[in-house]
Amino acid sequence: MDVDDRATEVEEAHREAALAAHLAQAKQPERPSAFHCEDCGGDIPEPRRVAVPGVSLCVDCKSIHEHLGRK
């Protein structure tokens, strides 16, 4: 293995580590889960709050947002 091959391996390892760190950070919620939907004001059940950290919409409102192409 020559120097260029080793440099490529090191660069790939660094890139993979950076991507993994970025994905792990992206999965962290920016805020705690809401107890009430920010659109309709309905309750967000605990199983949903636990399953989707940082959730702010109930299932029905989230479905509407996805259907309309919103986040």
Image: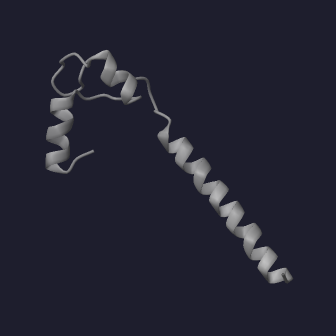
Left or right position of 15 against 50: right
Could you say which is closer to the camera, residue 48 or residue 26?
A: 48
Q: Residue at x 53, y 48 (%)?
A: 23
Q: Position of residue 10 (x, y in %)?
A: 76, 67
Left or right position of 7 against 49: right
Placement of the C terminus among the 4 image quadrants: top left
Left or right position of 12 against 26: right
Placement of the N terminus among the 4 image quadrants: bottom right
Q: Residue at x 80, y 82 (%)?
A: 4
The answer to whether residue 34 is seen in the rendering is no
Give the colouring mode of the picture. one colour
Left or right position of 67 against 54: left
Compared to residue 2, the image places residue 15 above or below, namely: above
Residue at the extreme front = 1
* Count of marks, rendered view: 0
Q: Position of residue 17 (x, y in %)?
A: 66, 55
Q: Residue at x 17, y 32 (%)?
A: 61
The answer to whether residue 12 is seen in the rendering is yes
Figure quadrant of residue 63: top left
Q: Residue at x 49, y 44 (%)?
A: 26
Q: Position of residue 70 (x, y in %)?
A: 22, 47
Compared to residue 7, the image places residue 56 above or below, namely: above
